[in-house]
Amino acid sequence: MSWKLSAVAAKERVEAALEARDEDPFWDANIVLTGFEIDPEEPDTWRLDAYLEDAPGTGQRRAVLALFGDNQPELEEEELPETDWVTESQRGVKPITAGRFYVHTPDHAPSDAAGIRNFCIPAAQAFGTGHHETTWGCLVMLDRMEQQGLSPQSTADIGTGTGLLAFGALHLWPETIATASDIDPVCEPAVIGNAEGNGIAMGSGKGTLTMLVADGMDDPALQSAAPFDLLIANILAAPLIDMAQDFAGAVVPGGDILLSGLLTTQEADVTKAYRDAGCVLHDRLTAGDWSILWLKQNSST
């Protein structure tokens, strides 16, 4: 990729733009977006960068600006060295600590703190570097689950992105059989590459990860691996609600479901959908404007 479009706006507007991209089924996959804080002293000011292989056309500029709705920011255009787009996309992406996990890009060194599990996740096309509040919150909640005695024999990470949450589960529960899936085919090589770089074994047995390209639970291999003891889904509120019955049916009686990708304002609707599917809210946390929910399926359902 050799061109970049940039727009500076409030944090909530950049996050809303990224969410609008995720919800657009016709989004041009050749436009890769990233959003991040520009200056730690001004945490509410973010920049959205759009990377393209060729010089952007009028339609691509309009597509990026349309993510901001009617109040569109100024869009700057820059030509980049042909092989520099990864470095550019990772600029400003700093390491984070989430529970006992330390997540960093290749530009940063791992942590040497005791009891910390390092994960090196390049910022690329697949979502889930740990820096968004939803992914951070899931890692924190997984850590909390383990501390409270949860010990799943099988785990599913639906909408896995980079594979990070599945990796975290495998660290916490080395004997779990992990299955990761995503609707986006670009995630499969990303997960496999990230697994190799982080010492995660691919396979179908205990302590290994299977990666599938699937739309929700609509995949024979995913269905045959179910029911799971723990199901993780860090996606968006609308599909979380739509798939409540599917997810509730994909865990064992009394099993656990970890949901993220929903705003706090959407929490009531998501919780109701899972309550109607036979689940109860066990624990929750918030990260910025986002809710992270730990639910349990009623053992009687």
Image (cartoon, rainbow, N blue to C red):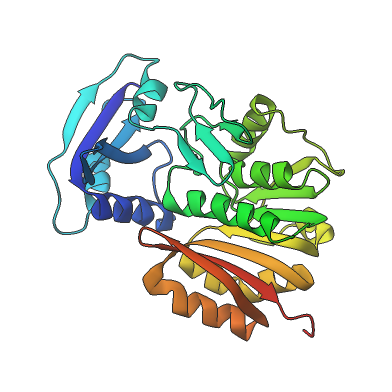
Residue for point 82% across, 38% down: 203
**Picture coordinates of residue 158 (x, y %)?**
63, 55
Residue for point 49% across, 40% down: 97
From where the camera sits, is residue 58 visible?
no
Which image quadrant is residue 295 in?
A: bottom right
**Picture coordinates of residue 200 (x, y %)?**
72, 33
- Name the side, left or right, on which 257 lies relative to 45: right
Q: Is residue 296 above or below residue 185?
A: below
Q: Residue furthest front?
A: 114
**Picture coordinates of residue 285 (x, y %)?**
49, 64
- Image quadrant holding the N terminus, namely top left
Residue for point 67% across, 32% down: 195
From where the camera sits, is residue 232 visible?
yes
Q: Residue furthest right?
A: 205
- Image quadrant holding the C terminus, namely bottom right
- Name the side, left or right, on which 279 lies relative to 72: right
